[in-house]
Image (spheres, rainbow, N blue to C red):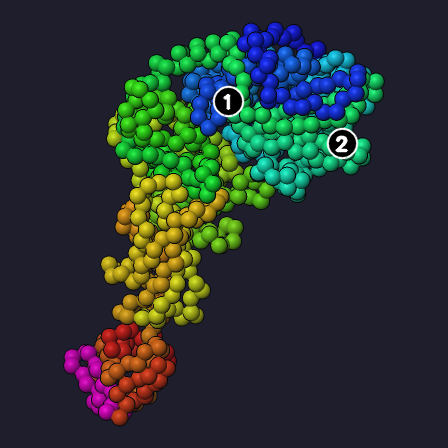
């Protein structure tokens, strides 16, 4: 636990000379003479974005300049973070172990930070031995305890004196931490419930006992957030809404993170004075904004009397701090050499899946995810790899064809660009899974109730499959193939996955249950470097590796030849790829039996983009039993298949009486189809030297072992559902053997006795 006065801070020259540029500073909350006005400015999910970039990313120097300006306007200012300062960083920071980001935040005067899940990307050891020692600010996590104990693993709180007011900060990290990072990396930690942990610390800081730490004002820094910036998502029964509602009344403000949303809410709290609401804020991500909470505190009662909150965009509104700019410039220079190395070429964009609004969709199949799986399967050949899986959260940037600037021609892939895609430095792990376990891994894409996302689409290589998106949990996967062979549930397959997935990350628990597990020692980025060097130029594979198939409930006996049914197909197109075409074709033995136009509309959070309803006509000559129907999107190379049951189009019933060598049989044939059978003819083969002498009610002829019964002139046709009966007399010296098949006008009939 830390209880300190805020360390001295020196006003940057740029801030001192730019006090007039304070349009971003919020109007003060209502304050009486003598009240203490405290300004809190926060970031979250900075993710090493130290350089200025597109989409409003201001960079660390402008962030520091803004903080300097705010402090110049009010010395009672604190700079805070709700976590994920590092991890999933861009190349300049990533290639230097995120040291430039920590150094820049130190120089910017970050006072305190919650731990986020990405601080643990390289495990607890990296936090304990690298990040925390390098940071000049405390990292907090009230809900992380040492495994097997209730002992805090990190400081739960930090208290500082601001003009006579003791301000306490309590930190917490998302309860989903074990599924967001490698479980092996945090095996010595236990994640406790956020609300219980935070309330316990807040109550401790407010209980009047100076021996256990005291604070006049309590602020929560929590690496958890709502799904959208809408107020409803912070006040409903969602994970975050429940968190906010469950906080004790002594928590005065909440800085949130994790979900990359930007909002400033004022939420009523039962028991608070009329008109006073709790600020709950989040700044978005990447240093595009800072969130600002202003607290006015009565210096006598030491209580908050008024407050306000807002979100302030940074780019173009504040000067760059020269000290931090120098740190950034040095980092850029250090990364320039390795970052500009050419690894190979691509012929078109390789992208992640997107939602309808253009943001990343981790529930969609993507050309980038499948490429990375291809790379890892290729890299795992020496370990016997047959199948590879890639988690969508491990893809942090798209790999784009267009030039990034001078010296980088179109199609060129630099080391920086490859590293931005996979910045986590996971190793590749080989393990044995049974076919049944492989299917279970695919089922685990549908995440458990309460998971941070409902569905996570794995990139796959060496494996294709069909699924039913409407099926019950555990029953989605309908068919799977390894290479071109059907998956055998009892066989053993060698599977390649990165170390995060292999440890059961993202709730893929089955991958942690493999046998003969071997860490190959290959870093995922190294595998990509080698692959591009050997396979360049690389093109996106537009063929889907999974296809959704929803079939209607079939008739009891199956579909009759010539009948039709509607098949719902999905996942026929990528949500974020060009030139995919719009037609799906169904065939049986090369014969087209249905086609439809594909709807390319995106279905958010799922892999259902590219949907079509196809009217399938069962071929008239289809044989009874399972009928394989091929699915193809000719323009992309997508191929898959499914089966439907085909019914017998007719039924033959017969009874036989035998006396010595002579037999008399009664035969009844029924047309089970919806079409009239004209000039019906029944055929079969004897197999035991039987001979027919004549028929009654049909003309019966035999040539060799082959027998034909022709319709009589008075009943030549069989209408739908109609039957015809005839008798036949013959000899069977060696006994009468039932025919294996009987056909009506060339179509096999069911035989009943």
- Counting from the top left corner in percent of width and height, residue 343 is at 30, 23
245 or 692: nearer the viewer: 245
On whether residue 546 falls in the magenta region, the answer is no
- Counting from the top left corner in percent of width and height, residue 334 is at 40, 11
Q: Quadrant of the C terminus?
A: bottom left
Question: What's the CA distance linking mark 1 and mark 2?
Answer: 32 Å
- Of all residues, the one furthest to the front in this rendering is 20
**248 left or right, relative to 436:** right
Above or below — where is 237 with respect to 723?
Answer: above
Can residue 387 be seen here? The reply is no
On whether residue 709 falls in the magenta region, the answer is yes
Of callouts 1 and 2, the N-terminal one: 2
- Counting from the top left corner in percent of width and height, residue 84 is at 55, 25
Give the class, few, some or many, for how many residues have Cα within 10 Å of label 2's Cα (few <14, many ≥20): some
Give the class, few, some or many, for how many residues have Cα within 10 Å of label 1's Cα (few <14, many ≥20): many
Above or below — where is 499 with respect to 628?
Answer: above
**581 left or right, relative to 79:** left
- Of all residues, the one furthest to the left in this rendering is 703
513 or 631: nearer the viewer: 631
Q: Which residue is mark 2?
A: 276
Helix, strand or loop status at disc 2: loop
Residue at figure coordinates x 42%, y 48% from the top left? 601
- Counting from the top left corner in percent of width and height, residue 541 is at 31, 40
Residue at figure coordinates x 46%, y 37% from the top left? 360
Q: Quarter of the image holding residue 575?
A: top left
Q: Which residue is mark 1?
A: 315
310 or 79: nearer the viewer: 310
Q: In the rendered structure, which segment of residues is drawn in magenta?
A: 693-713
* Disc number for residue 241: none
119 or 491: nearer the viewer: 119
Would you say the magenta stretch is mainly helix, strand or loop? strand
């Amino acid at each position: 636990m830390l209880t300190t006065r805020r360390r001295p801070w020196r006003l940057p020259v740029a801030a001192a000379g730019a006090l007039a540029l304070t349009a971003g500073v919020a109007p003060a909350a209502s304050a009486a003479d003598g009240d203490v006005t405290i300004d809190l400015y926060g970031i979250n999910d900075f993710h090493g974005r130290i350089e200025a970039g597109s989409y409003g990313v201001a960079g660390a120097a402008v962030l520091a300049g803004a903080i300097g300006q705010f402090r110049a306007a009010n010395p009672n200012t604190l700079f805070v973070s709700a976590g994920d300062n590092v991890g999933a960083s861009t190349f300049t920071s990533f290639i230097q172990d995120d040291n430039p980001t920590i150094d820049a935040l130190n120089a910017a005067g970050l006072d305190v930070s919650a731990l986020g899940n990405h601080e643990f990307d390289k495990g607890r050891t990296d936090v304990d031995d690298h990040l925390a020692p390098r940071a000049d600010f405390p990292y907090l996590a009230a809900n992380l305890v040492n495994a097997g104990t209730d002992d805090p693993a990190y400081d739960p709180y930090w208290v500082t004196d601001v003009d006579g007011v003791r301000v306490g900060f309590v930190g917490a990290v998302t309860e989903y931490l074990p599924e967001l990072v490698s479980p092996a990396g945090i095996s010595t930690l236990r994640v406790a419930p956020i609300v219980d942990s935070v309330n316990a610390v807040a109550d401790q800081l407010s209980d009047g006992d100076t021996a256990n730490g005291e604070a006049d004002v309590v602020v929560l820094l929590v690496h958890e957030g709502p799904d959208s910036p809408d107020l409803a998502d912070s006040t409903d029964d969602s994970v975050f809404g429940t968190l906010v509602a469950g906080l004790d009344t002594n928590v005065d403000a909440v800085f949130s993170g994790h979900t990359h949303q930007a909002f400033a809410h004022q939420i009523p709290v039962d028991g608070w004075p009329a008109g006073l609401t709790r600020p709950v804020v989040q700044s978005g991500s990447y240093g595009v904004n800072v969130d600002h909470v202003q607290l006015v505190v009565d210096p006598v009662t030491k209580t908050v009397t008024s407050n306000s909150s807002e979100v302030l965009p940074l780019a173009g509104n504040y000067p760059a701090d020269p000290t931090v700019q120098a740190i950034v410039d040095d980092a850029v220079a250090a990364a320039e050499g390795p970052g500009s190395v050419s690894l190979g070429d691509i012929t078109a964009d390789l992208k992640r899946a997107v939602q309808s609004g253009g943001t990343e969709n981790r529930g969609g199949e993507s050309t980038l995810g499948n490429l990375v799986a291809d790379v890892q399967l290729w890299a795992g050949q020496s370990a016997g790899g047959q199948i590879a899986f890639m988690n969508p959260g491990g893809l942090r940037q798209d790999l784009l064809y267009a030039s990034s600037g001078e010296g980088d021609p179109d199609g060129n892939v630099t080391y920086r660009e490859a590293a931005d895609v996979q910045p986590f430095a996971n190793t590749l792990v080989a393990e044995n899974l049974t076919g049944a376990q492989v299917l279970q891994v695919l089922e685990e894409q549908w995440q458990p109730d309460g998971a941070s996302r409902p569905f996570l689409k794995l990139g796959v290589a060496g494996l294709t499959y069909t699924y039913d998106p409407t099926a019950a949990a555990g029953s989605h996967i309908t068919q799977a193939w390894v290479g071109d062979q059907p998956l055998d549930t009892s066989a053993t397959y060698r599977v390649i996955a990165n170390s995060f997935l292999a440890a059961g990350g993202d709730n893929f628990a089955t991958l942690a249950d493999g046998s003969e597990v071997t860490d190959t020692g290959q870093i995922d980025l190294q595998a990509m470097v080698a692959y591009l060097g050997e396979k360049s130029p690389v093109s996106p594979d537009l063929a889907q590796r999974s296809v959704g198939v929803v079939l209607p409930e079939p008739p009891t006996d199956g579909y009759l030849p010539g009948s039709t049914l509607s098949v719902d197909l999905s996942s026929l197109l990528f949500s974020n790829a060009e030139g995919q075409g719009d037609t799906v074709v169904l065939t049986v033995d090369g014969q087209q039996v249905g086609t439809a136009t594909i709807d390319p509309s995106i279905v958010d959070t799922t892999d259902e983009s590219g949907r079509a309803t196809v009217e399938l006509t069962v071929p008239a000559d289809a044989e009874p039993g399972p009928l394989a129907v091929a699915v193809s999107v000719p323009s992309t190379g997508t191929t898959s298949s499914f089966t439907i049951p085909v019914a017998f189009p007719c039924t033959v019933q017969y009874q036989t009486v035998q006396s010595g060598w002579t037999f008399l049989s009664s035969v009844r044939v029924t047309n089970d189809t919806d079409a009239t059978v004209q000039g019906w003819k029944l055929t079969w083969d004897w197999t035991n030297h039987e001979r027919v002498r004549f028929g009654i009610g049909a003309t019966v002829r035999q040539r060799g072992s082959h027998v034909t019964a022709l319709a009589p002139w008075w009943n030549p046709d069989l209408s739908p559902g109609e039957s015809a009966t005839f008798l036949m007399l013959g000899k069977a010296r060696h006994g009468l053997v039932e025919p294996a098949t009987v056909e009506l006008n060339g179509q096999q009939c069911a035989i009943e006795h």
